[in-house]
Image: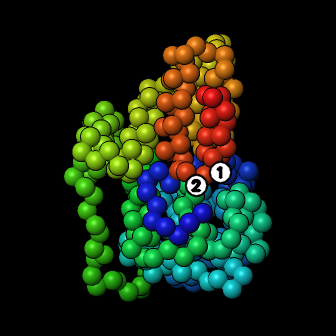
Amino acid sequence: MTNAPLNAASLRGAVDLSSLVRQHNTPTPEVGEGASDQPAGEASKPSGFATSANDASFTQVLELSNTVPVIVEFYGQGVEPALEPTIAQYKGRFALVMVDATSNPQLVQAFQVQEVPTVAAVIGGRPVQLFSGIMPETDLKEVLEQVLQLAAQNNVTGTLPAAEGSEETEEEPVEEPLPPLHQEAFDAISAGDYPAAIAAYKSAITQNPRDQQAVAGLAQVSLLSRLEGHTADAVRSAAGQEPLNVEAQLAVADLDVSGGHLGDAFDRLLELFPSVDADGKSAIRTRLLDYFEIAGAEDPRVADARRRLTLLLY
């Protein structure tokens, strides 16, 4: 990963966290309370909108991520958590969860942590890899704004209450406004009007073909639009009945990507590629390129899929 500023294409489903969901019910951590001693397996509450979690308590974080996007900060090996002051500026629009990478191997494996600090997000129970290393605050805020946009697309728009007795920030953080067409797309997504969002992103790309945030946003909202009105059972049933039907396989690949199963989507389409005609190959290639934008070039699964596609093309 890199310390360079990320764009919307870097926001992607990382892994399936279902293995971390415990079978019994546990209360959602009340982020925003003051520090208190917690029994083993429960999240501690250092201050403000920050808390700590471990392998045993992460189910609470998944539940919390249905209310607000959760930023997960892995630290350890002489690296201390550093994101709390920035997260506090958003006044409850995020929760921050700090995880000691040296003592939580399940979370380290689930989030594919290779160094500290590593920062990820969880939105509606789904993980999103963000970056590793130390990022300047200006670039960090840009990433956080993109996380808020992705959260809005998934209807995760709550706000946490401030800690009782906590000091209020005197000045509201100054947020850079989105470009007009990006704001138009964002508002349309929030309203569930995917065709309008698609049109706005296309206009942005027409004005600036190098606008990678618009390219990635178009790929994301196009996927949401294609899935609208369909059920997972119907999509998978159709794909099972017609294994060589390109449209049916593209639909189930969309479903896989929406659930964070990027590798499954790549395998499905790349294995189908040699068996279809020229039009089918073109459709698969186009869809894979969309997925590459959604996932981000830094995802190792993207690099592997690009190599496989190149070999199939030539």
Marks 1 & 2, CB-CB < 8 Å contact = yes
What secondary structure is found at the residue carrying circle 2? loop
Q: Is residue 314 above or below residue 120?
A: above
Residue 57: image location, x then y, percent: 69, 65
User: Which one is in front, 160 or 251?
Assistant: 251
Q: What amino acid is found at the position of numbered circle 2 in the picture?
A: Glu
* Residue drawn at x 42%, y 70% as measured from the top left: 139
**Quadrant, the N terminus:** bottom right
Q: Is residue 147 left or right of residue 79?
A: left
Label of residue 300 in the image: 1
Residue 302: image location, x then y, percent: 61, 45
Q: Is residue 49 left or right of residue 53?
A: left
Q: Is residue 95 above or below residue 281?
A: below
Which residue bears the numbered disc 2?
298
For the question of whether residue 299 can be seen, the reply is yes
For the question of whether residue 64 can be seen, the reply is no
Q: What amino acid is found at the position of numbered circle 1 in the picture?
A: Pro
- Gap between marks 1 and 2 measured at Cα: 6 Å
* Residue drawn at x 54%, y 76% as measured from the top left: 134
Image color mode: rainbow
Label of residue 281 in the image: none
Residue 28: image location, x then y, percent: 58, 62
* Residue drawn at x 51%, y 31% as measured from the top left: 287
Residue 179: image location, x then y, percent: 25, 55
Q: Quadrant of residue 100?
A: bottom right
